[in-house]
Image (cartoon, rainbow, N blue to C red):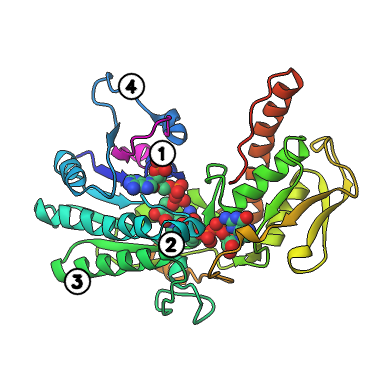
């Protein structure tokens, strides 16, 4: 029997990798996409199938996590074996600006799905994965963090995700549903949204290298994160739904680096030797030497990284480091891509894009480069 999966957030970073993964496993994949005034399916266009083909294995439904009747109707139509709830307003800094919307989508949205499954009598058939997050630990109580480390969320995003974590546990305990949380630490890829720190760095430095931007403006570069690759992490999301009994798992690499480290790696991948000097908001990243033709627009002495306090958060999560022992021992999961390898892949992809832009520019076709607002 072909299994059917429903993915909320299929147009996002994880949704796109998970959809690829499940299609390769032979699943029929349904995804919820939002109506937008511009196309928003770039990450899945390569696996999209013309709906006129007979029995397309990837089907998209318009919907929104804020819309109960829409979610319930989609659940009824699809009758999924597995639901992956990846949809969210997923940006921590933005959640301080839109806290109520974030609570609705990232918190109550999860309840809407769980209730929909129950209302339709699917609770014994449908397995449910909740995209929980290391942001739950926030002000960390223990290092490294495990499945039993207490939570202390530090943003409206994390507080909304805390609700989702517990409502998932509650539906498991109250109704015997196969529902589980993956507590995932930061994971990135060339498909990462442009305003998350890793992608902002690789994209920004590639643009600087090619002369499309002058300088990269950063927030707290002392922040420490445990970064993995999204491809490794979506595999684990699927594995968590294939067990005999539902359980929650921490997914992390167990290795921690600073944002500053990531900037230095990305610069190095672009042939730029960079050094940081100064302290606090006066700290700058200055070019020491340029070692290749990848960065024709920069020269020794240029300041290409500066601190802009607008990117500081009202409450910061300074340090996160996960302990994935349970996932390794119980599920045999091992991350295969290191943070440095991932950074190299991201920098190479962003350099390709920046080179295309620079080429167009040199022929008088000046495409606007979106900068972070
Ligand atoms: P992205 O921001 O790349 O993707 C989020 C997805 O959610 C997009 O498809 C987006 O649609 C969709 N979405 C946003 N708002 C709504 C809404 N109101 N209704 C329905 N869909 C909506 O996130 P990631 O792929 O990186 O993360 C996937 C999930 O995992 C998220 O829940 C995130 O919070 C969580 N998480 C992520 C981690 C990470 O490091 N990446 C770590 C831990 C947890 P659109 O494309 O239209 O914007
Ligand atoms: P995070 O990821 O908040 O951990 O949430 P992000 O990449 O946004 O920030 C990581 C750290 O870098 C610091 N930082 C900056 N961040 C951004 N975005 N822009 C900057 O200019 C900048 N300068 C420094 C941040 O302060 C922070 O400490 C991500 C999201 O994917 C969540 O959805 C997910 O739940 C968590 O990871 C785990």
Considering depth in this image, is 277 or 96 the residue closer to the camera? 96
Considering depth in this image, is 234 or 142 the residue closer to the camera? 142
Magenta range: 20-40
- Local packing at callout 1 (Cα closer than 10 Å; few below 14, some 14-19, many 20+) is some
**What distance separates the C-alpha of mark 4 from that of mark 3?**
41 Å
Q: Is residue 223 left or right of residue 303?
A: left
Q: Earlier in the sequence, mark 4 or mark 3?
A: 4
**What distance separates the C-alpha of mark 4 from that of mark 1?**
16 Å
Q: Earlier in the sequence, mark 2 or mark 4?
A: 4
Question: Disc 2 vs disc 4: which is toward the camera?
Answer: 4
**What distance separates the C-alpha of mark 1 from that of mark 3?**
32 Å
Q: Is residue 356 left or right of residue 189?
A: right
What percent of the width, then of the height, locates residue 163? Answer: 31, 67
Question: Disc 3 vs disc 2: which is toward the camera?
Answer: 3
**Residue 289 seen by the camera:** yes
What percent of the width, then of the height, locates residue 165? Answer: 32, 66
* Residue located beneath label 2 in the image: 332
Circles 4 and 3 in contact, beta carbons < 8 Å = no
Q: Earlier in the sequence, mark 3 or mark 2?
A: 3
Q: Quadrant of ligand 2?
A: bottom right
**Residue 234 seen by the camera:** no
Residue 292 figure quarter: top right
**What distance separates the C-alpha of mark 2 from that of mark 1?**
21 Å
Question: Disc 2 vs disc 1: which is toward the camera?
Answer: 1
* Residue located beneath label 3 in the image: 173
Circles 3 and 2 in contact, beta carbons < 8 Å = no
Circles 2 and 4 in contact, beta carbons < 8 Å = no
* Residue located beneath label 1 in the image: 20
Q: Earlier in the sequence, mark 2 or mark 1?
A: 1
* Residue located beneath label 4 in the image: 50
Q: Is residue 359 magenta?
A: no
Q: Is residue 193 left or right of residue 236?
A: right
């Amino acid at each position: 029997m072909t299994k059917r999966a429903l993915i909320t957030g299929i147009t996002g970073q994880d949704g796109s990798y998970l959809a690829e993964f499940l299609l390769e496993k032979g699943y029929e994949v349904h995804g919820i996409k939002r109506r937008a005034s511009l196309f928003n399916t770039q990450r899945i266009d390569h696996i999209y199938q013309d709906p006129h083909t007979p029995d397309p294995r990837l089907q998209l439904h318009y919907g929104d996590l804020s819309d109960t009747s829409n979610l319930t109707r989609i659940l009824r139509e699809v009758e999924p074996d597995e639901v992956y709830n990846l949809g969210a307003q997923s940006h921590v800094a933005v959640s301080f600006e839109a806290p109520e919307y974030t609570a609705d989508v990232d918190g109550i949205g999860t309840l809407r799905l769980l209730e929909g499954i129950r209302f339709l009598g699917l609770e014994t058939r449908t397995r449910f994965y909740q995209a929980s997050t290391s942001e739950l630990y926030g002000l960390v109580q223990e290092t490294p963090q495990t499945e039993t480390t207490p939570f202390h969320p530090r943003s409206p995003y994390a507080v909304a995700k805390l609700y989702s974590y517990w409502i998932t546990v509650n539906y498991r305990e109250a109704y015997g549903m196969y529902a589980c949380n993956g507590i995932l630490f930061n994971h990135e890829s060339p498909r990462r949204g442009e305003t998350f720190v890793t992608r902002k760095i690789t994209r920004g430095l590639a643009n600087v290298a090619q002369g499309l931007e002058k300088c990269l403006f950063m927030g707290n570069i002392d922040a420490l994160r445990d970064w993995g690759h999204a491809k490794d992490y979506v595999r684990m999301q699927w594995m968590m739904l294939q067990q005999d009994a539902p359980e929650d798992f921490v997914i992390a690499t167990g290795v921690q680096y600073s944002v500053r480290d990531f900037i230095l790696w990305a610069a190095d991948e672009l042939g730029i030797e960079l050094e940081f000097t100064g302290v606090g908001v006066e700290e700058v990243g200055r070019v020491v030497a340029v070692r290749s033709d990848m960065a024709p627009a920069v020269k020794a002495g240029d300041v290409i990284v500066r601190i802009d306090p607008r990117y500081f958060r009202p409450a910061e999560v300074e340090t996160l480091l996960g302990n994935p022992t349970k996932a390794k021992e119980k599920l045999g999961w091992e991350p295969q891509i290191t943070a440095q390898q991932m950074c190299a892949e991201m920098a190479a992809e962003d350099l390709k894009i920046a080179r295309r832009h620079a080429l167009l520019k040199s022929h008088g076709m000046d495409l606007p480069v979106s900068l972070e607002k």
